[in-house]
Amino acid sequence: MWNTAESGRSPKSHRTGPVTPPRARAFPRLDTKMKEPSTPASATPLFPLGQLVATPGALALLERLGIQPATLLSRHVRGDWGTLSGDDRQANTEALSNGARILSSYPVGVAERVWIITEADRSSTTVLLPSEY
């Protein structure tokens, strides 16, 4: 399990194994060709998201804060991975070519954080809270 809730960092071992969040539910597919006024990294999607799922906790937090999951997913798929260590950013960059899992970590609210994980086989992308991993 990652320990970003306290340290803000995740171990390199986070790149293996599927994510099976508790009671995850599917939500409508995101149009990954969606344009945003400020595209921080790439203007086009860098990888497929696969099936989109989110945990109830992540959806409740984002709804409470008035943040659309699609906004964070759009950042994720374009290479804006939020607040990650240099090692995790490098691992994500390498994952674009070697097919490893891709992690994003976005601070939301005052002291909360949402993670987005795209599986190595690109079959699914999960929006979750660190405590739900």
Image (spheres, rainbow, N blue to C red):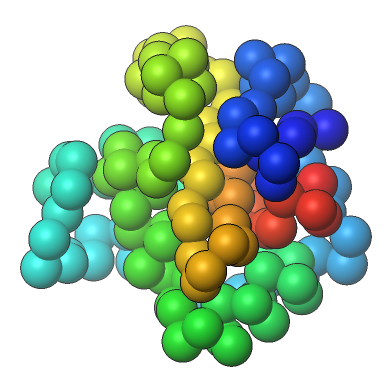
Q: Nearer the viewer, residue 58 or 120?
A: 58
Residue 85: x and y, percent?
A: 47, 25
Residue 56: x and y, percent?
A: 77, 75
- Give residue 79's quadrant in the image: top left
Give the residue furthest to the right: 22
Residue 62: x and y, percent?
A: 56, 77
Position of 45 relative to 73 (above/below): above
Residue 126: in sight, yes or no? yes
Q: How many marks?
A: 0
Position of 41 relative to 75 (above/below): above
- Give residue 61's quadrant in the image: bottom right
Q: Nearer the viewer, residue 117 or 46?
A: 117
For image coordinates 68% across by 20% down, the residue present is: 11
Q: Quadrant of the N terminus?
A: top right
On screen, residue 86 versus residue 99, left or right, reads left
Residue 30: in sight, yes or no? no
For image coordinates 49% across by 57% down, the residue present is: 107
For image coordinates 42% across by 70% down, the residue present is: 70
On screen, residue 102 versus residue 15, left or right, reads left
For image coordinates 57% across by 86% down, the residue present is: 63
Residue 123: x and y, percent?
A: 62, 42
